[in-house]
Image (cartoon, rainbow, N blue to C red):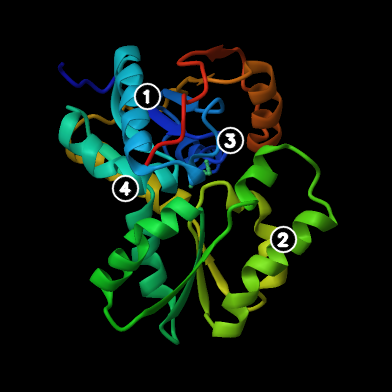
Amino acid sequence: MELTADLAIGVFDSGVGGLTVLDELLARLPAEDFLYFGDTAWFPYGEKGDDQLRARAEEISRWLLGQGVKLIVIACNTATAAAAEHLQRVLEVPVIGVMTPEAHAAVLTTRNRRVGLLATEATVRSGSYARMVRAHDAGVELVSVPCPLLAPAIQSGDPFDERIMEMVREYTAPLREAGVDTVILGCTHYPMVERLLRRSLPGVTLITSGEELAREVHDSLRRRDLLRATGTEGDYRFACSGDPAAFRELGSRFLQMPLGVVEQVLGGAPERAVG
Ligand code: DGL
């Protein structure tokens, strides 16, 4: 398949978390078309096994390719940890995940060389962030905290009340104790509770993936001569595997933009949780 500048950029996540990444992409690449897929029927990815996530990520990517995309963004840390290398091997378009830019930014930011990580269980278990941080600076200590309930609490669409505040307090306690000065928000859902996190981690620099990643996507397209001419406004459209009305409602609340018609594709929950 020949890649041309007029094709769209494909973006996917397990739900609405990747919208925090799409938000940056829309701002940095306004002339581009975007196709976002939220795998809401499979949410949460954080408790699934690597093989299962790899197969699903490939299925989603092949669907995106069938729609006509020139680059795929994995706007989900869990899927990046499980499937980025596999997708880069088997697909004929560039695939960019969310973890490398954050690991790099965290190492450049920390002064006391103590960095915290908040992420899903699967992401922490993969050890990917620890490897990436070490590759940039072997002297940086990474304190990782799995937060199994946080992405589901955000994705549920319930108001951010005292219960979620308490959850955030609990998950950040080990990081306060360890005295980290920089924390990677290692799940694309977490920037949606950034205010709560800031309150629980005073004086700590929070690292999110959107901005760095958008820069990388821009660079990747520019070097390959696949950037659209500026001056026009691109389109964006959405699809999900679960209930499209629920996705539309939650998505427009978080993105603060109208989502339009949300198509339902690749439906059906996973048959069983396998490793
Ligand atoms: N937003 C996803 C991530 O970045 C994961 C949430 C989930 O599906 O568990 O890790």
| Residue 272: percent from left, percent from top | 46, 29
Amino acid type at mark 2 = Met
How far is disc 2 from disc 1 in space, using C-alphas?
32 Å
Badge 4 marks a residue whose secondary structure is: helix
How far is disc 2 from disc 4 in space, using C-alphas?
33 Å
Q: Disc 2 vs disc 3: which is toward the camera?
A: 2
Amino acid type at mark 1 = Ile
Between discs 2 and 1, the one toward the N terminus: 1
Q: Name the residue under label 1.
A: 60
For residue 147, which quarter of the picture? bottom right
Q: Which of 62 and 55 is in front in this view?
A: 55
| Residue 176: percent from left, percent from top | 62, 80
Left or right: residue 73 compared with residue 201: left
How far is disc 4 from disc 1 in space, using C-alphas?
22 Å
Between discs 4 and 3, the one toward the N terminus: 3
Q: Residue at x 44, y 51 (%)?
A: 122
Q: Residue at x 73, y 37 (%)?
A: 157
How far is disc 2 from disc 3 in space, using C-alphas?
20 Å
Q: Which of 166 and 13 is in front in this view?
A: 166
Q: Mark 2 points at which residue?
A: 167
Q: Mark 4 points at which residue?
A: 216
Q: Name the residue under label 3.
A: 16
How far is disc 3 from disc 1 in space, using C-alphas?
16 Å
Residue 152 versus residue 113 in the image, above or below:
above
Between discs 2 and 3, the one toward the N terminus: 3
